[in-house]
Amino acid sequence: MHWTDPVVLIAALGGGVGIGHVIRALATVLQKLRAGVSPREGKRRIDIVQQRDEALARLDKERMRASAEQARADWADANRQVAVENEQRAREHAAALRVQLIEQAGLTREELPAWPEMERTIPREQFLRVRRGQEGIG
């Protein structure tokens, strides 16, 4: 062996390692190009997609809650309107009965009892007793 042979051998080995490193780096670059993004960017993209999906789910849930709340409010408004209409019908019917009483019984307006207080409410228990016929409103 010649004294240059070890130098050539070391140079060849060093070059081989260098070429292997270059090939490994090229493979990594090709992998990234094929995937389109680096692994960190890919994870970030997945996180953003998950956040978007979660936000859309929260939005749908909030819309459903708001829709249900609006439906309850509409139902309550409709019930209030029905109650107002029923009260008006009751007042009109009472007025018609009062007129009939005056005409048929020969009473004067002064002889009739005063109009009841229409805004008065009674406790639920008393209402249920009256409904069952146990006592008068009083």
Image: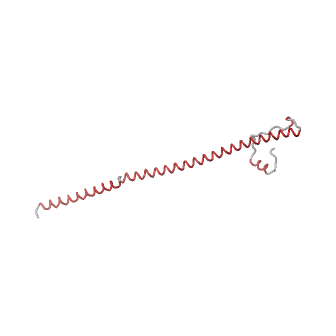
Query: How far across and down, in percent of the image, does residue 130 sit?
Result: 79, 48
Instruction: For the N terminus, give its image quadrant.
Output: bottom left
- Residue visible at 44% across and 51% down? 49
Query: How far across and down, in percent of the image, does residue 129 sit?
Result: 78, 50
- Residue visible at 38% across and 53% down? 42
**Which is more toward the observer, 63 or 39?**
63
Decide if residue 100 is on the left or right side of residue 60. Answer: right
Q: Quadrant of residue 12?
A: bottom left
Decide if residue 26 is on the left or right side of residue 76. Answer: left
**Which is more toward the observer, 47 or 96?**
96
Instruction: For the C terminus, give its image quadrant.
Output: top right
Residue 13, above or below 85? below
Query: How far across and down, in percent of the image, does residue 67 sit?
Result: 58, 47
Residue sitting at the far bottom: 1
Q: Quadrant of residue 103?
A: top right
In this rendering, the count of numbered labels is: 0
Residue sitting at the far left: 2
Residue sitting at the far right: 106
Query: How far across and down, in percent of the image, does residue 43 sit?
Result: 39, 53
Colouring mode (rainbow / by chain / secondary structure / one colour):
secondary structure
**Which is more toward the observer, 106 or 134?**
106
- Residue visible at 29% across and 57% down? 27
